[in-house]
Amino acid sequence: MSSKNPADFVFVAFKGGVAAFDRYDGADAWIWKPQALKGFFNRFNPSSFLTIARDGDRLVVASSKRVWCLDPLTGAEVWSAEVKDIGGGYPIIAGNDGGQGAAAAAAAAAAAAAAAAASAG
């Protein structure tokens, strides 16, 4: 069993896929590409431009027509769902940031306290 966790990786979306890299040494961990559409619609390739967000222990990937949930440690597809009646465009994902927001808030509070102490003293 791996001792890695999702915070140990950097995730990059590229045209047609997602890659994971070890955040400490840059080693590539995995590459995921969605299954190509079949038939006439394949030429429109709605999965070309992807948006990604880590949501706790999952990685959410979205295109204008589909959403996938990946295991961030392996790149294995957990589930996928078709997006209907949305009309395309570039998707934006909102989800649990895995605690990154709390860390940023704590860092901002510490910086504000240090600035207040410096101006008082």
Image (cartoon, rainbow, N blue to C red):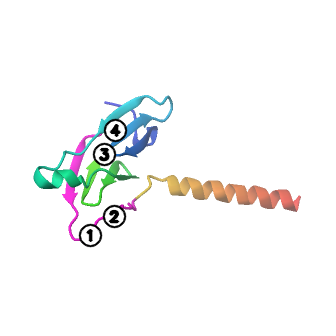
Q: In the picture provided, is 51 more to the left or to the right than 88?
A: right
Q: Along the polypeptide, which appears first: circle 4 or circle 2?
A: 4
Q: In the picture provided, is 94 more to the left or to the right than 46?
A: right
CB under 8 Å between discs 4 and 3: no
Residue 67 among those drawn in magenta:
no
Type of amino acid under label 2:
Gly
Whole-Å distance between the Cαs marked 1 and 2?
9 Å
Residue 81 among those drawn in magenta:
yes
Q: Quadrant of residue 5?
A: top left
In this figure, which residue is indicated by the disc labeled 4?
A: 73
x, y (%) of residue 76? 25, 40
Q: Nearer the viewer, mark 4 or mark 3?
A: 3
* Residue 74 visible in the picture: no
x, y (%) of residue 60? 33, 53
Label 2 secondary element:
loop
- For residue 48, the mark is none
In this figure, which residue is indicated by the disc labeled 1?
A: 86
- For residue 16, the mark is 3
- For residue 89, the mark is 2
Whole-Å distance between the Cαs marked 4 and 3?
19 Å
Q: Residue at x 37, y 32 (%)?
A: 29
Q: Nearer the viewer, residue 79 or 120?
A: 79
